[in-house]
Image (tube, helix red, strand yellow):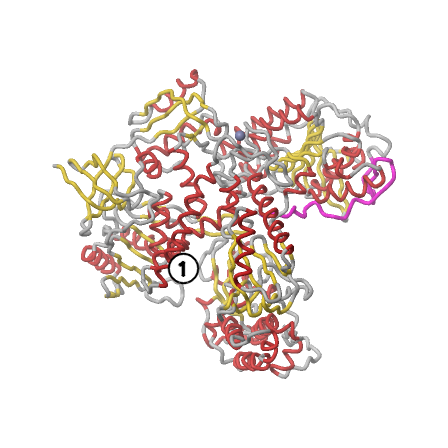
C-alpha cells in the first residue's frame, strides 16, 4: 500500500501510547499491519501497567511474550521502586487456540472477568487468526464474528477500551480475506503499522466511529508529524530504547 | 428363521437398514445381519426454538423425531434441559447435523460430531471383536449375550484370512511411480497381476478375491494409490470389483490431509475402507507398524473404534473415543465443538506455568558406575493420582490450591474423564508387561502377543500428556497440561532430595528419568532408594539398570552444551542403550548408522572408561574402513539415502535446500506431494551432476531416490562430513574433533579453497535440510 496516496494521517507512535496512559473511556482501537504490532502493543501495555492500570489480554495467535513483560517489569520497576511481581500481577492473559475458544473468551469469560477485576484496557492479539483455519466452516465463522463484534461493542459501552492487534495476512481464500475488513469496520480508530528501516511507522488509517478526539488528547510528544523517533518515550518523558527482545519470540511451548 | 452364532463381531457400518454387522464364528464362517439404530444429537435451545428445528428437519424424506430430555453437561456438571434430535436414517445423520448447524450457533450442539458406528457401540455396549452368543432372526440381529468385555485382558480373536495386495517392487514406494506391477499373496502363494490388458488385471483380481475370500486385505499404499487406482480403473472399464464383501455397500473414503500437530507438519493419506472386510494399509497406520494386528485389535476393542477406522486414526482419536464412551456410560453430554477457554491468569502465574518438565544438565563426556532410575508412566500416573482432567482443574465447584506452585484448584467432588479412562490403561499395561516377562522366561512364544499389546498401550500413555495440551484435543485444557508439568517438577525434586540425603550424587535428570552415582552402591541399594521415592511421590520409580559406562555427548552447535535426551552406554549385563545419537535417528543414512553401530560394538567388552580409552584406536580403525569405502566412491548409494519430511509444497519452497530440490524434481516428474509427506533422496556432487545432465539448467545437489540412477554417484564430501560428525559424537571426549579426525582418517590437510571447488568442510548436518 502506498501510504501517501491514501487519505490518512501519519500518527506519532507516542500519541498512541498516550491513549493508554490517559484514563481511557471506551473506544475500539485496531492496530494492524507489520508483525511489530504485537511488540508495540506490549510496549504500550507496559506503560499502562506502570501507571497502575490493570490490563486483560486475550491472545489468539500465540504472540504474547511473557518474558518481554517480565524483562520490562524488571527494568522499569527498578526505576520506579516497585516490585516486578506487583507489575506482573496487574496483567492478565487468556490464550485462545481455536476460533470456538476465542468466541467463548470474548463473549463470556472476558466480560465477566473485566468487570470483576476492573481492567479498563483490553488487548486482543490476532483475534481472527484462528478463524482463518479452513476446518471451521465459513458460515459458522461469520456468525461467530458477528457475536464477537456485538460483545466488543457492549464492552465499549461499559467504558472498556479495547485494542486489537493483528498481523496483516494474505489468505488463499478470498472469503476469509474479507473477514478482517469486516471486523476493522466495526472499530472506532484504525492504525496501520509498517516497518521503516527497522522502526515502526504508524498511519492513522481512519476513524469510523464518532470518536475523533485523538488529536486533541495527543499529549506533548508531537502530533501529526511523521514518526521517526529512534527511541520511545518512557512514562516520565525520557527517551528510552524499546527493549531489544523480540515479541515474536514465542514463549516456550510449541503446539 | 432364527440363527444362533457363537463368535466375534467383525465389522459394523451404517446402512439403509440402520447398522449392518458382520459376524465370524469359530469355524471362520461369516454372517451378515442388520440392526435398526436411531442416532441422536442434542441441542441446548429454548422450547420456543424447537419449532424452527422441526421445520428444518421436516424436509428430509425420513422421520426425524424431537423430544425434550434432561441430560448432564460435562463441564458444568449440571443437568440441562435439552432437545434430543433422533435421525431414523443412519446414513443421513451427518446431513441432518449439517443442516441444523447452518441455522443454530455451534455451541448449542452436543454429541453431534460422533460418527454413527461409534455411537452404536457406545449405546449398545458392543465393541469390535466382541466375543459372545448372537441371535439373528430373519437377517436382523435381535439379541446377544457377550462372554467378553471391552476391557477384558484375556480375550481371543477369530480365525482371520488375510490376502496381501502389493506393488511388486518394494524398492521404491508406489507413491513415486507411474506404473505398477501388482501382486496378490495368500495361503503361502503369490500371484502376479501383470498384464498388458487392464481388463485382465481386474478380472484376475476378482478371481483371487473369490477364491481366497479374505477377511483382511493387507496393502502397502492401498489408501493413497492402489485401491483408488483399481477402483477408478474398474469404473472406467465398467468391470465391478469385488473388494467389498457386502456387494450392496460402497467404499468409505476420505481425502488426504496435511495438518499441524505439536508444532510440526504432518501428512495423512486419505482412507479407503471396505464393507464386510478390513482393508489395512500398513503405510497409513501408525499402530499397524508399531504393534501389528495384535495392537490394532487391542486398541479397537478398548476404544470401540471400528477396526479399519482405528487402524488409520491418531492416538488422539483413540483416546477421545475412550473418553466419549466413558461420557456415554456415565450419562454426560459432550459439546460438539471444544470451546472451554483458558482462564485469565496473571503474567506472574503464566511465567510459572509456562515451564515444562525439569532438566538437570549432565556433566559432558563419559561416566562410569551410574544407575538410571525411571518413573514408570509418570505423566499418566500423575493425571490418575491427582485427578487432572479438563473439567476438574479449576472446576466450578471447589476452592483449593492443590497444584504445586500454580495453586490451581482440583475438583474433589468427582473423578475426571481423563483419569477415569487412563487408569485402566495404566493397570492393563502393567499386567501385560508382567505376563510378557513371565512367558518369556518360560520360553513361551505367546510373550510376543503381550508385548504387542503392551506396546500399543504404551503409545496411548506416551501421547496422553501432549494431547492434554493440544488445541484440537476434545478433552484438552492448557491448565491441566500445566498442572501435570508442575506435579512432575515437584516429584523429580522430591526424588532428588531423597537421593542426595542418602549420599547419592545426582548426575543428570530429564523430566522423569534420573542418573545417579554412589561409590560402591549395589543394585539392592538402588532398589531400596526406588521404594522410598515411590512411597513419597506416589509414582512408581524403577531401576532401569546400572551402566558400566555412559556417554553424554555435547551439542553440535556448542561443544560445552549437552543436548537433552542424547546418550549411549552399556549396562552391566552388556546390553546397550542408545538415545538421540545418529545410530538411533531416523534421518541418518544407513551407512552412517552402520558405521557408528559397529564402532559401538567395539566398545562392548569395555568395563570402564579406562577400557573405553584403550579401545579408541580400534574404533578409529573401524571408522577408517567406512570412510575409506565412502571416499573411494564405492559405497552402496542405497545406504546413503536420506529421509526427510517436506514442510511445504514444491512451489512454495523459496530456498535451494536439498528438500526443496527434491520436491521440485518430483513435481516436475508429475509426482505431487503434500506438506508432511516423506521424501527419500541421495546427495550428489552438484558439479558432476551438472556436467552429466546436459539438458538441465542448474546442477542438482540432491536427487530423489525414484529418479536416481547408479551412475550419478554421490557427494563424497558431504557424506564424509556426516560420517566424521558421527565419529566425533563418540570420540570428542578423548579430543577427537572433526578436524583432527579428518587428518587421521583420510590424511586431509586443509588447503586454500578455489572458487571452482566444492569443499563442504563447513557444512553442518542441519544445513542439508
Ligand atoms: Zn469441584
Q: Compared to B197, does B323 lie above or below?
A: above
Neighbours of disc 1 within 10 Å: few (<14), some (14-19), many (20+): some
Q: Position of residue A51 (x, y in %)?
A: 80, 31
Quarter of the picture holding the N terminus of chain A = top right
Q: Which residues are magenta?
A: A225-254
Q: Main secondary structure of the magenta part?
A: loop
Q: Nearer the viewer, residue A218 or A157?
A: A157
- Name the residue tied to disc 1: B175
* Relative image position of residue B539 (x, y in whole percent): 52, 48
Foreground pick, B510 / B642: B510
Residue B740 sits inside the magenta stretch: no
Asked if one can make out residue B282 in the rendered structure from this viewpoint, the answer is: no
The image shows residue B700, relative to residue A97, as above or below, that is: below
Viewer-closest of B667 and B243:
B243
Of B539 and A222, the residue lying toward us: B539
Is the shortest distance between ligand 1 and the CB of mark 1 under 8 Å?
no
Residue A242 belongs to the span the image colors magenta: yes
Residue B107 position, x and y percent, is 49, 28
Left or right side of A153 for B672: left
Q: Is residue A220 left or right of residue B54?
A: right
Residue B734, by quadrant, is bottom right
Amino acid at each position: 500500500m502506498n501510504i501517501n496516496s491514501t487519505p490518512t494521517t501519519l500518527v506519532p507512535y507516542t500519541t498512541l501510547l498516550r491513549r493508554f496512559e490517559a484514563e481511557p473511556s471506551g473506544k475500539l482501537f485496531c492496530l494492524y499491519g507489520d508483525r511489530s504490532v504485537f511488540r508495540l502493543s506490549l510496549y504500550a501495555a507496559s506503560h499502562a501497567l506502570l501507571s497502575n492500570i490493570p490490563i486483560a489480554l486475550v491472545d489468539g495467535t500465540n504472540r504474547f511474550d511473557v518474558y518481554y513483560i517480565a524483562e520490562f517489569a524488571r527494568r522499569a520497576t527498578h526505576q520506579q521502586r516497585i516490585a516486578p511481581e506487583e507489575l506482573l500481577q496487574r496483567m492478565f492473559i487468556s490464550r485462545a487456540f481455536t476460533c470456538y475458544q476465542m468466541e467463548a473468551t470474548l463473549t463470556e469469560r472476558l466480560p465477566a472477568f473485566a468487570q470483576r477485576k476492573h481492567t479498563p484496557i483490553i488487548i486482543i492479539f490476532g483475534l481472527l487468526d484462528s478463524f482463518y483455519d479452513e476446518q471451521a466452516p465459513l458460515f459458522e465463522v461469520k456468525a461467530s464474528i458477528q457475536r464477537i463484534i456485538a460483545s466488543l461493542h457492549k464492552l465499549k459501552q461499559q467504558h472498556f477500551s479495547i485494542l486489537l492487534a493483528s498481523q496483516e495476512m494474505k489468505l488463499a481464500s478470498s472469503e476469509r480475506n474479507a473477514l478482517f475488513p469486516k471486523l476493522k469496520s466495526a472499530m472506532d480508530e484504525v492504525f496501520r503499522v509498517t516497518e521503516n528501516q527497522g522502526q515502526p511507522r504508524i498511519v492513522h488509517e481512519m476513524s469510523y466511529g464518532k470518536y475523533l478526539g485523538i488529536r486533541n488528547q495527543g499529549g506533548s510528544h508531537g502530533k501529526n508529524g511523521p514518526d521517526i523517533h529512534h527511541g520511545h518515550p518512557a512514562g516520565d518523558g525520557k527517551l528510552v530504547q524499546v527493549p531489544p527482545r523480540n515479541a515474536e519470540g514465542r514463549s516456550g511451548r510449541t503446539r | 428363521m432364527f440363527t444362533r452364532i457363537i463368535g466375534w463381531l467383525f465389522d459394523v457400518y451404517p446402512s439403509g437398514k440402520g447398522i449392518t454387522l458382520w459376524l465370524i464364528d469359530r469355524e471362520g464362517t461369516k454372517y451378515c445381519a442388520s440392526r435398526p439404530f436411531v442416532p441422536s444429537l442434542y441441542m441446548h435451545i429454548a422450547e420456543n426454538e424447537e419449532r424452527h428445528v422441526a421445520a428444518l428437519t421436516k424436509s428430509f424424506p425420513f422421520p426425524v423425531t424431537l423430544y425434550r430430555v434432561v441430560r448432564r453437561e460435562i463441564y458444568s456438571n449440571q443437568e440441562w434441559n435439552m432437545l434430543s434430535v433422533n435421525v431414523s436414517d443412519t446414513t443421513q445423520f451427518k446431513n441432518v447435523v449439517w443442516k441444523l448447524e447452518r441455522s443454530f450457533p455451534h455451541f448449542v450442539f452436543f454429541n453431534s460430531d460422533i460418527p454413527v458406528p461409534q455411537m452404536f457401540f457406545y449405546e449398545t455396549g458392543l465393541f469390535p471383536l466382541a466375543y459372545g452368543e448372537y441371535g439373528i432372526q430373519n437377517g436382523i440381529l435381535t439379541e446377544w449375550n457377550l462372554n467378553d468385555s471391552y476391557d477384558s485382558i484375556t480375550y481371543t480373536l477369530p480365525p482371520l484370512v488375510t490376502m496381501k495386495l502389493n506393488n511388486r517392487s518394494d524398492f521404491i514406494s508406489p507413491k513415486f511411480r507411474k506404473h505398477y506391477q501388482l501382486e496378490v499373496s495368500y495361503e503361502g502363494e503369490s500371484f502376479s497381476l501383470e498384464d498388458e490388458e487392464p481388463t485382465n488385471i481386474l478380472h484376475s483380481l476378482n478371481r483371487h478375491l473369490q477364491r481366497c475370500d479374505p477377511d483382511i486385505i493387507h496393502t502397502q499404499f492401498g489408501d493413497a494409490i492402489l485401491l483408488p487406482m483399481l477402483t477408478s480403473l474398474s469404473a472406467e472399464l465398467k468391470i465391478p470389483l469385488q473388494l467389498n464383501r457386502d456387494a450392496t455397500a460402497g467404499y468409505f473414503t476420505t481425502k488426504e490431509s496435511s495438518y499441524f500437530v505439536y508444532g510440526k507438519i504432518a501428512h495423512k493419506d486419505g482412507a479407503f475402507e471396505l464393507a464386510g472386510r478390513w482393508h489395512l494399509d500398513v503405510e497409513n497406520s501408525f499402530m499397524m507398524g508399531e504393534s501389528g494386528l495384535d495392537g490394532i485389535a487391542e486398541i479397537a476393542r478398548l476404544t470401540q473404534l471400528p477396526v479399519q477406522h482405528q487402524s488409520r486414526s491418531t492416538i488422539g482419536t483413540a483416546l477421545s473415543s475412550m473418553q466419549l464412551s466413558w461420557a456415554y456410560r456415565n450419562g454426560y453430554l459432550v459439546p460438539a465443538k471444544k470451546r472451554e477457554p483458558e482462564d485469565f491468569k496473571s503474567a506472574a502465574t503464566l511465567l510459572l506455568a509456562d515451564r515444562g518438565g525439569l532438566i538437570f544438565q549432565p556433566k559432558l563426556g563419559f561416566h562410569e558406575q551410574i544407575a538410571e532410575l525411571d518413573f514408570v508412566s509418570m505423566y499418566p500416573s500423575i493425571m490418575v493420582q491427582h485427578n487432572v482432567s479438563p473439567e476438574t482443574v479449576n472446576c466450578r465447584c471447589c476452592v483449593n490450591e492443590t497444584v504445586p506452585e500454580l495453586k490451581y484448584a482440583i475438583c474433589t467432588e468427582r473423578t475426571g474423564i481423563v483419569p477415569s479412562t487412563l487408569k485402566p490403561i495404566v493397570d492393563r499395561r502393567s499386567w501385560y508387561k508382567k505376563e510378557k516377562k513371565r512367558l518369556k522366561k518360560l520360553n513361551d512364544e505367546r510373550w510376543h502377543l503381550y508385548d504387542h499389546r503392551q506396546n500399543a498401550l504404551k503409545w496411548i500413555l506416551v501421547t496422553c500428556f501432549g494431547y492434554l495440551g493440544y488445541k484440537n484435543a476434545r478433552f484438552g485444557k492448557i491448565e491441566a497440561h500445566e498442572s501435570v508439568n508442575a506435579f512432575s517438577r515437584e516429584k523429580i525434586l522430591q526424588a532428588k532430595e531423597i537421593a542426595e540425603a542418602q549420599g547419592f550424587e545426582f548426575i543428570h535428570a530429564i523430566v522423569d528419568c534420573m542418573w545417579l552415582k554412589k561409590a560402591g552402591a549395589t543394585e539392592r541399594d538402588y532398589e531400596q532408594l526406588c521404594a522410598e521415592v515411590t512411597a513419597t511421590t506416589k509414582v512408581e520409580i524403577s531401576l532401569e539398570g546400572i551402566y558400566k559406562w555412559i556417554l553424554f555427548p555435547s551439542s553440535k552447535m556448542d561443544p560445552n552444551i549437552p543436548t537433552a535426551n542424547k546418550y549411549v552406554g552399556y549396562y552391566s549385563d552388556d546390553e546397550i542403550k542408545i538415545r538421540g545419537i545418529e545410530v538411533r535417528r531416523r534421518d541418518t543414512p544407513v551407512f552412517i548408522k552402520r558405521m557408528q553401530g559397529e564402532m559401538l560394538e567395539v566398545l562392548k567388552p569395555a568395563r570402564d572408561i579406562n577400557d573405553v580409552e584403550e579401545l579408541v584406536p580400534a574404533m578409529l580403525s573401524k571408522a577408517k574402513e567406512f570412510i575409506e569405502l565412502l571416499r573411494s566412491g564405492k559405497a552402496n548409494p542405497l545406504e546413503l539415502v536420506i529421509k526427510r519430511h517436506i514442510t511445504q509444497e514444491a512451489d512454495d519452497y523459496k530456498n535451494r535446500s536439498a528438500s526443496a530440490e527434491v520436491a521440485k524434481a518430483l513435481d516436475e516428474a508429475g509426482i505431487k506431494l503434500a506438506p508432511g509427506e516423506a521424501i527419500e533422496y541421495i546427495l550428489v556432487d552438484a558439479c558432476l551432476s551438472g556436467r552429466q545432465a546436459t539438458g538441465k539448467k542448474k546442477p542438482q545437489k540432491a536427487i530423489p531416490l525414484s529418479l536416481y540412477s547408479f551412475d550419478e554417484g554421490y557427494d563424497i564430501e558431504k557424506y564424509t562430513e556426516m560420517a566424521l560428525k558421527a565419529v566425533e559424537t563418540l570420540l570428542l571426549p578423548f579430543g577427537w574433533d572433526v578436524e583432527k579426525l579428518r587428518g587421521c582418517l583420510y590424511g586431509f590437510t586443509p588447503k586454500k579453497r578455489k572458487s571452482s571447488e566444492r569443499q563442504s568442510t563447513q557444512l553442518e548436518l542441519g544445513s542439508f535440510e
